[in-house]
Image: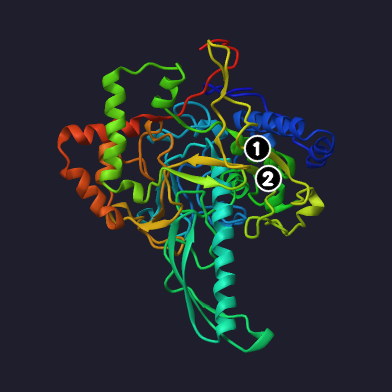
Amino acid sequence: MLSASVAFAEIPQPVDQMELMRRLDEDRLSCFNHAFEAGDEITEATYTMARGVGARVAEGQYFTRLPRADLADTGDWAQHEPQREGGPQAHSCISCHSSPLANGAGPLAMNVAIDPLHSGEPGQFLERNTLHLFGLGAVQRIAEEMTQELKAQEALVAEQACAKQEPVTLALTAKGISFGDLTATPDAQGESCTGQIDYEQLYGVADDLIIRAFGWKGTHITLRSFARGAAHNEMGMQAVELVGDADGDHDGVTGELSIGDLTAVTLYMAALERPTSKLELADLGLTELTDDERARIERGEARLAEAACTSCHVPSLQLEKAVFSEPSAVPGFAEEELPSGADARALGLDPDRPLWFDLTKDQPNNRITLASGEEVLLGAFAPSGDHGATVTWYSDFRRHDMGPALADPVDAYGMGASVWPTRSLAGVGSTGPWLHNGHATTLREAILAHGGEAEASKAAFAAMPEDQQQELIAFLENLVIENFDPEEEDH
């Protein structure tokens, strides 16, 4: 079922992970489509307190727009397991992810306040605007492959230091993106040498070299982790894999989201159609652009590069293997033990038998038949090489210091209050307001709020004549999210 507009649906029955595995053995693609449909139903469902939505904020209160670390009696907000950051404030995924359509971003009115430090001080609350969910399977795959590249170089520099019995420094790169330097020093001789790694010269990534692509601060490694965290914090829906049989939010309901539910939601988000552009849609005859509009957009793309915005908002990266697997088998992304302490394989999350789909051809949405009769897989990513894909995402997947104007009031995650992963520009023309707190009501305001490592690019934009600034903005407005109903036969 496609979700072209926000419309609440009935609550589905829990998805059985073992039933998904049985279906997988019978027909991989059929199993994937079944899981996708189930994930669609879950994200559209309007959950009730009888099914576990909400949490015991305090006696008789089950939802809150503000963090309540002051409510610390037994079972109250501050005593929930795992510890809450905010909410709950929603009873459906698409009540927040609603703009410009279901699974999209969120209007300013849907901003949430979170208190990760449980300070109870409004001045230390963090404000967050809702991000869109489109095309995210490729994002996790890029993060996985970059992590694998970085880890391989970490092993190499340690091996070289041991072989040479002297310090060795290696420039660290992944998919052509620089992540600083690693230096290894031999810590022994012979086979007992493993190499002591110095991470001080790293840039844009944590010492564990894992690319974290989800959440405004990059606090989640996988889509699955992001989904169960959002379900807990924003909706009070606690996944079995998060709390086991416990009632961690003290609302009187357990088993609120099954293992299969999270698998379905993860595959659904991973396989949602990718963002597109007005230029691409016009080339397919799906929208109209005048010659002047097209020329302005094309000049705007050049302006983006002239301002060096593309040094961080890298237009596209190449995937070597365009297959999304749930669960992932990539070290750092695979979970042998779930947050509840349960064994993942025992509950049907086996990286040797994953549910998977091809990012270049399996997405169910935006499969369009043109008036010419040609079928276009607009929701899929463009194939590249033998098994890869081109992912047009406008991000370098690194962390950057964006200066005091874009800083959180506190450093809640230990990476710096003003440090953020490069936010993708894919779909940016459809997802205002902008920035982590939604305080930029125009794209111009968002650009001019940049500072820190982006100060030079902001200055270059500000120095452009007005018409060139408008061209750059026209290019950004061209990066859109569209959903096409397959029942419309001709376009």
- The answer to whether one can see residue 233 in this image is no
Q: Secondary structure at mark 1?
A: strand
Residue topped by disc 2: 325
Q: Is residue 126 left or right of residue 473?
A: right
Instruction: Pick the residue in front: 153 or 37.
Output: 153
**Which residue is depicted at the point 77% across and 51% down?**
352
**Which residue is depicted at the point 63% across and 49% down?**
249
Position of residue 102 measured from the top left corner of the image (x, y, whole percent): 52, 28
Residue 422 to residue 291: above or below = below
Q: Are marks 2 and 1 in contact (CB under 8 Å)?
A: no
**Which residue is depicted at the point 49% across and 49% down?**
215
**Which residue is depicted at the point 63% across and 55% down?**
333
Position of residue 218 measured from the top left corner of the image (x, y, whole percent): 49, 53
Instruction: Pick the residue in front: 16 or 326.
Output: 326
Of marks 2 and 1, the one in the foreground? 1
Res 412 → quadrant: bottom left
Instruction: Describe the colour scheme in one phrase.
Output: rainbow
Q: Residues within 10 Å of mark 2 (few under 14, many from 20)?
A: many
Residue topped by disc 1: 358
Position of residue 270 measured from the top left corner of the image (x, y, whole percent): 60, 39
Res 400 → quadrant: bottom left
Residue 486 to residue 61: above or below = above
Check disc 2 and give the amino acid type: Ser
Q: Secondary structure at mark 2?
A: strand
Res 279 → quadrant: top left
Residue 44 to residue 201: above or below = above
- The answer to whether one can see residue 381 in this image is yes
Q: Residues within 10 Å of mark 1 (few under 14, many from 20)?
A: many
